Image (cartoon, helix red, strand yellow):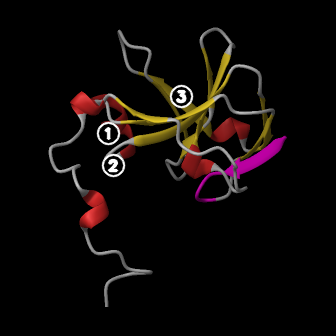
Amino acid sequence: MSTKGSCLCGEVHFEIEGEFDSFYLCHCPHCRKDTGSAHAANLFSSTATLTWLSGHSRVREFTLPATRHVKSFCATCGSALPNIQEDGQLVVVPAGSLDDNISIRPTAHIFMASRAEWDTDLQNIRAQPGLPG
Protein backbone atom coordinates (compact mmCIF):
# COMPACT_ATOMS: atom_id res chain seq x y z
CA MET A 1 0.00 0.00 0.00
CA SER A 2 1.24 3.49 -0.84
CA THR A 3 -0.06 6.59 0.93
CA LYS A 4 0.93 10.16 0.08
CA GLY A 5 0.91 13.28 2.20
CA SER A 6 2.10 16.87 2.35
CA CYS A 7 2.35 19.99 4.47
CA LEU A 8 -0.08 22.91 4.44
CA CYS A 9 2.02 25.18 2.19
CA GLY A 10 2.77 22.36 -0.26
CA GLU A 11 6.56 22.60 -0.07
CA VAL A 12 6.97 19.15 1.50
CA HIS A 13 5.56 15.95 -0.04
CA PHE A 14 6.13 12.39 1.15
CA GLU A 15 5.06 8.82 0.53
CA ILE A 16 4.56 5.98 2.99
CA GLU A 17 4.98 2.52 1.46
CA GLY A 18 3.50 -0.27 3.58
CA GLU A 19 0.78 -0.92 6.11
CA PHE A 20 0.07 0.88 9.37
CA ASP A 21 0.09 -1.21 12.56
CA SER A 22 -1.89 1.15 14.76
CA PHE A 23 -3.58 4.53 14.91
CA TYR A 24 -3.59 6.23 18.31
CA LEU A 25 -5.33 9.36 19.53
CA CYS A 26 -2.93 10.55 22.23
CA HIS A 27 -4.15 12.89 24.96
CA CYS A 28 -0.82 13.28 26.81
CA PRO A 29 0.28 16.84 27.66
CA HIS A 30 3.14 16.71 25.12
CA CYS A 31 0.83 15.81 22.23
CA ARG A 32 -1.74 18.39 23.28
CA LYS A 33 0.96 21.09 23.34
CA ASP A 34 2.50 20.20 19.99
CA THR A 35 -0.86 19.97 18.19
CA GLY A 36 -2.64 22.77 20.03
CA SER A 37 -5.64 20.45 20.21
CA ALA A 38 -7.35 17.87 22.40
CA HIS A 39 -5.11 15.09 21.11
CA ALA A 40 -2.63 14.03 18.48
CA ALA A 41 -3.78 11.55 15.82
CA ASN A 42 -0.76 9.46 14.79
CA LEU A 43 -0.34 6.34 12.68
CA PHE A 44 2.48 3.91 13.50
CA SER A 45 4.24 1.28 11.38
CA SER A 46 7.16 -1.00 12.16
CA THR A 47 7.40 -2.16 8.52
CA ALA A 48 6.57 0.85 6.30
CA THR A 49 9.11 3.09 4.63
CA LEU A 50 9.05 6.89 4.44
CA THR A 51 10.22 8.58 1.24
CA TRP A 52 10.49 12.36 0.91
CA LEU A 53 9.22 13.29 -2.57
CA SER A 54 10.00 17.01 -2.28
CA GLY A 55 10.98 19.59 0.29
CA HIS A 56 13.03 17.35 2.59
CA SER A 57 15.37 20.30 3.26
CA ARG A 58 12.39 22.13 4.82
CA VAL A 59 11.73 19.38 7.39
CA ARG A 60 12.78 20.18 10.95
CA GLU A 61 12.70 17.92 13.98
CA PHE A 62 12.30 18.69 17.67
CA THR A 63 12.87 16.15 20.43
CA LEU A 64 11.58 17.12 23.85
CA PRO A 65 14.54 16.65 26.22
CA ALA A 66 14.41 13.64 28.55
CA THR A 67 11.41 12.15 26.68
CA ARG A 68 10.64 9.99 23.64
CA HIS A 69 8.46 12.79 22.25
CA VAL A 70 9.55 13.78 18.72
CA LYS A 71 7.87 16.23 16.37
CA SER A 72 8.79 16.77 12.73
CA PHE A 73 7.39 19.80 10.95
CA CYS A 74 7.67 22.01 7.88
CA ALA A 75 9.98 24.98 8.52
CA THR A 76 7.79 27.18 6.32
CA CYS A 77 4.23 26.50 7.51
CA GLY A 78 4.75 24.51 10.73
CA SER A 79 2.63 21.53 9.61
CA ALA A 80 3.28 18.27 11.43
CA LEU A 81 5.14 15.70 9.31
CA PRO A 82 6.21 12.05 9.65
CA ASN A 83 9.37 10.96 11.41
CA ILE A 84 11.37 7.83 12.07
CA GLN A 85 11.83 6.77 15.70
CA GLU A 86 13.32 3.96 17.77
CA ASP A 87 16.56 3.75 15.78
CA GLY A 88 14.78 3.51 12.45
CA GLN A 89 12.35 0.82 13.54
CA LEU A 90 9.16 2.91 13.73
CA VAL A 91 7.53 5.29 11.25
CA VAL A 92 5.21 7.80 12.95
CA VAL A 93 2.80 9.69 10.68
CA PRO A 94 0.46 12.49 11.76
CA ALA A 95 -2.90 11.43 10.29
CA GLY A 96 -3.78 15.00 9.32
CA SER A 97 -0.72 15.21 7.07
CA LEU A 98 -2.03 12.52 4.72
CA ASP A 99 -3.55 13.50 1.38
CA ASP A 100 -4.88 10.00 0.62
CA ASN A 101 -7.72 8.23 2.39
CA ILE A 102 -6.75 5.38 4.70
CA SER A 103 -8.76 2.34 5.71
CA ILE A 104 -7.40 1.95 9.25
CA ARG A 105 -9.60 3.47 11.97
CA PRO A 106 -8.25 4.73 15.30
CA THR A 107 -7.06 1.84 17.48
CA ALA A 108 -7.49 3.58 20.83
CA HIS A 109 -7.48 6.82 22.78
CA ILE A 110 -4.33 6.77 24.93
CA PHE A 111 -3.24 8.78 27.97
CA MET A 112 -6.88 9.55 28.79
CA ALA A 113 -5.87 10.24 32.39
CA SER A 114 -4.02 13.30 31.02
CA ARG A 115 -6.75 14.62 28.75
CA ALA A 116 -7.83 18.26 28.92
CA GLU A 117 -10.62 18.87 31.42
CA TRP A 118 -12.81 20.35 28.63
CA ASP A 119 -12.35 17.21 26.48
CA THR A 120 -15.51 15.37 27.54
CA ASP A 121 -18.85 14.68 25.84
CA LEU A 122 -17.72 16.38 22.62
CA GLN A 123 -20.10 14.22 20.61
CA ASN A 124 -22.96 16.16 22.23
CA ILE A 125 -22.02 19.62 20.97
CA ARG A 126 -23.52 21.17 17.84
CA ALA A 127 -21.90 20.09 14.55
CA GLN A 128 -21.86 22.38 11.51
CA PRO A 129 -20.75 21.65 7.91
CA GLY A 130 -18.62 24.83 7.74
CA LEU A 131 -17.90 28.09 9.54
CA PRO A 132 -20.64 29.40 11.87
CA GLY A 133 -22.88 31.83 10.05
Whether residues under marks 1 and 2 lie with C-beta atoms below 8 angstroms apart, the answer is: yes
Give the percent coordinates (x, y) of residue 59.
62, 37
**Picture layout, residue 80 above or below residue 18:** below
The residue at 69%/49% (across/down) is 103
State the quadrant of the N terminus. top right
Query: What is the crowding at mark 2: few (fewer than 14 residues within 10 Å), some, or many (at least 20)?
Result: few
The front one of 117 and 70 is 117
**Picture layout, residue 118 above or below residue 20:** below
Judge depth for marks 1 and 3 and give the one in front.
Answer: 1
Tell me the amino acid under the disc marked 2: Ser
Q: Which residue is mark 3?
A: 61
Q: Which residue is mark 1?
A: 32
Give the percent coordinates (x, y) of residue 101.
70, 56
Element at label 2: loop
The residue at 64%/8% (across/down) is 87
State the quadrant of the C terminus. bottom left
